[in-house]
Amino acid sequence: MFDSFRLKKLRNSRNLTLKELSERVKISQTYLNQMENGAREPTLRMLEKLAKFYGINLSYFFVREEKGEYSVGEPESEEILKYLNKLSAQQKKNVLNYIKFEIYRLKKEEE
């Protein structure tokens, strides 16, 4: 079952307005709003578009969140998120900074 709450939470977590998301994914703002509020069920095509934009697994939209934990559908990512959910806000920032550093290092190696 499609979870409209997850769609809205994902957009908010990326600090996007409905208008910005609408422009980026080429889906009408009205349709996005209806999907987020549960007034309209999205088509598979729309969900595929959104999943591609956010870089997530399509299953994210169908798995209900429990206890504030996130689900992304990949076993490795699930395990990482399981541990992240146990960290403080500052510890999460430290992990994020480390990930950003590793991505930066990889990009430099590719140059």
Image: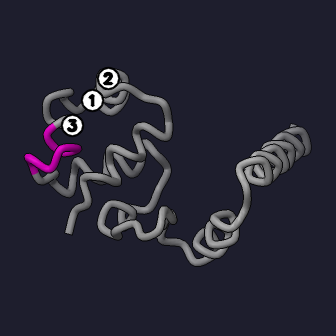
Q: Position of residue 6 (x, y in %)?
A: 35, 54
Q: Are marks 1 and 2 in contact (CB under 8 Å)?
A: yes
In the foreground, 67 or 32: 67
Residue at screen point 23% across, 47% down: 46
Disc 1 or disc 3, which is closer to the eye?
Answer: 3
Mark 2 or 3, nearer chain start: 2
Segment colored magenta: 34-40
Up the image or down, 41 lies above or below 63; here it is above
Residue at screen point 16% across, 51% down: 42
Q: Position of residue 24 (x, y in %)?
A: 37, 27
Which secondary structure, mark 1? loop
What label does residue 26 carry, if any?
1
Q: Quadrant of the N terminus?
A: bottom left
The residue to which callout 3 is attached is 32
Which secondary structure, mark 3? helix
| In this rendering, position of residue 98 left or right of residue 7 | right
| In this rendering, position of residue 30 left or right of residue 64 | left
Asked if residue 38 lies in the magenta stretch, the reply is yes
Give the amino acid type for the residue marked by disc 2 in the picture. Glu
What label does residue 23 carry, if any?
2
**Circle 1 Cα neighbour tier, 10 Å, few/some/many (<14 / 14–19 / ≥20):** few
Residue at screen point 38% across, 51% down: 51
Q: Residue furthest left?
A: 39
| In this rendering, position of residue 7 left or right of residue 105 | left
Give the amino acid type for the residue marked by disc 1 in the picture. Lys
Up the image or down, 99 lies above or below 62; here it is above
